[in-house]
Image: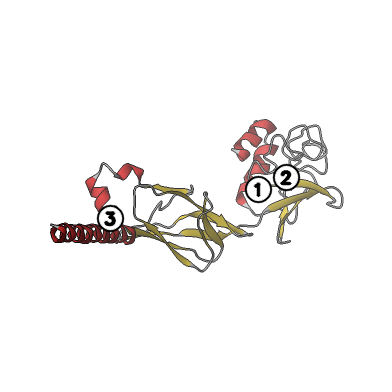
Amino acid sequence: MMNNTRNEVEESAVKHNSTWKLIAGLLAALTLAGCKIEVTVPSGGSVVTASGNFRCDAGETCTVDVYDIFFAEVFEAVPAQGQVFTGWRERQRGLCGGSLDACSLETAGMADNPSLMAVLESDQVFYLEPVFEKQAPYLILYGGEEQQFFLGCINCPAAHFESVCNANGSYGSPYAAYSIWNESGDFGSPYTNFSPWNIFATAAPVIYDTDGLFYGYLTANPSQQGRTRLSLLIQLTDFAADPQYTLASVRAWFCG
């Protein structure tokens, strides 16, 4: 009887040991199985997640393992100084291709979809790659007899505090002293010599970019030597000088 009991205990121990080995093996297999996200970052920026769990820098290719239904990350492209993010690259098995938004990826919704679960459990590789481009230089206005007054930024984002399109800023408000939209000011009246809207002006504002290159004069005076050749700005000055348009309507057109 004692021998039988000992044998039963030993057999039970062997079975339990085998069971734990099987469970451990299954857990290991589940951990290793799963699809992957390959993040390739060109020069010009980096990719991070909103959670702070992931970072991939310029020139690196980083791999993210996705092996369960609890994966949830938001990937953000972070351009370096002087660069701009122009979207996620479109390609076969590319994620968020063409989008300018942060790339939000999660697997929670896959649980009830056998096809999606098959992809999740496979060894397929998906790709995420930001596209960075050199930022175009900003165009800056200076006015006055010796161009000593800063008049704002022409092509900065409208919300930028120096933008000529920021209605609440010092250069975009129609009431600001240094605004080209102030019809009562030195730089917005169609009658002053410093105004871009005066067809007879000889001291209209000058345009430089942030790299220091000269882009001509912002003026409605067609005879002004050095008048800018940028077509959009020629249209702007021509419309503003045309009496059939109000300066407010021209501003609305230009600033969109």
The three-letter amino acid code for the residue at tag 1 is Cys
Q: Secondary structure at mark 1?
A: loop
Q: In this rendering, would 193 be left or right of 220? A: right
Q: Mark 1 and 2 residues: CB-CB less than 8 Å, in contact?
A: yes
Q: Which residue is mark 3?
A: 121
Q: Of the residues shown, which amino acid type is indicated by label 2? A: Glu
Circle 1 packing at 10 Å, graded few (<14), some (14-19), many (20+), is: some
**Which sits earlier in the primary sequence, circle 1 or circle 2?**
1
Q: Secondary structure at mark 2?
A: loop
In the orientation shown, which residue stands out farthest toward the front?
1
Q: Is residue 245 visible?
A: no
Q: Amino acid at mark 3?
A: Glu
Mark 3 vs mark 1: in front:
3
Which mark sits nearer the N-terminus, 3 or 2?
A: 3
Task: Give the quadrant of the C terminus.
Answer: top right
Q: Nearer the viewer, residue 8 or 19?
A: 8
Find the distance from the CA under tag 1 to the CA under tag 2.
8 Å
Residue pointed to by mark 2:
162
Closer to the camera, 146 or 57? 57
